[in-house]
Image (tube, rainbow, N blue to C red):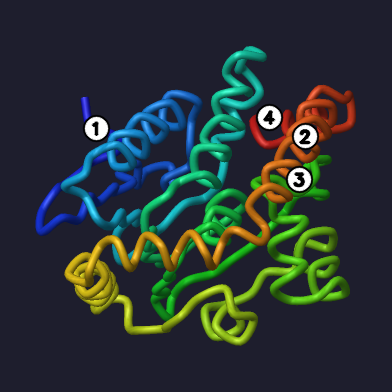
Amino acid sequence: MNNLILTTEKNKIFTIILNRSDKKNALSSAMYHELCQHFEYAKNNHNIHCLVIRGDENCFCAGNDLQDFLQCSPDDELVALEFVKVLANFTKPLIAGVAGVAVGIGTTLLLHCDMVIAADNAHFKLPFTQLGLCPEAGSSLLLTRLVGQNRAFELMVLGKSFNAEKAYQYGLVNEVCQANELIQITEATALNIAQLPNDAVMTSRRLIKQATQSVVNDVINDEGTEFARLINTPECKTILGKFFR
């Protein structure tokens, strides 16, 4: 059986590679559980100074596995929320390399990253309301703070898709590169960070994030409550069910 998530550890960098290309790296409850374990490992290992998350040069993450969501139990729904909380409270530099589709959580997780490198083939979309759902992962705060209320409404309520250049203009990504350069540039960025004095990096990161850390956690809880309510409404179940008829 193919491992849906691969990891490597080298040069004080821990890399998580989403490896479910046949489903465009859509995240199942089992994958969320595994991601939580990997993030906790990286957080607690003193030899790891930087974490990278990426797919390959063609695809990052198509969001939640909708079929899995339809079949999941309340406990399975909670593991997705648990991953969001682990992500938001991760204490080390987090770098993302994004190519191809970045949908839903594939975009909102980037709001918790310290650096995001995007390939020029990347496409971002937040189709929350189209699925009968609401923003998650703190995006109702973090994306609004980044792009402003009107643009946030356009992206999260109307679900307008945007490309890598727009993501750069919005401040969501740090750099846009060619797809065949994505992995190399992402790795080089992580290596540059991992080689800096670690105490200084960790302290600086904490100071940068401290002003919003507590409120982000509150927003994530509020979003999680509403998301769990909406996913169990007849309207949402009908919308999700249409994908598999």
**What is the spatial separation of the Cα atoms under label 2 and label 4, in whole angstroms?**
24 Å
Q: Quadrant of residue 175?
A: bottom left
Instruction: Write down the quadrant of residue 78 in the picture.
Output: top right
Residue indicated by mark 2: 227
Residue 33 percent coordinates (x, y) = 43, 26
Q: Name which of mark 2 and mark 4 comes first in the sequence.
A: 2
Q: Residues within 10 Å of mark 3 (few under 14, many from 20)?
A: some
Verify CB contact (< 8 Å) between mark 2 and mark 3.
no
Mark found first going from the N terminus, 4 or 3: 3
Residue 230 x/y as whole percent: 84, 31
For mark 4, give the secondary structure.
Answer: loop
> Going from the N terminus, do you reach mark 1 or mark 2 first?
1
Which labelled disc corresponds to residue 245?
4
**Amino acid marked by disc 3:** Val
Residue 219: numbered disc: 3
Rounded to the nearest angstrom, the CA distance separating label 1 from label 2 is 29 Å
Image point (64%, 81%), residue name: 170
Residue at which label 1 appears: 3
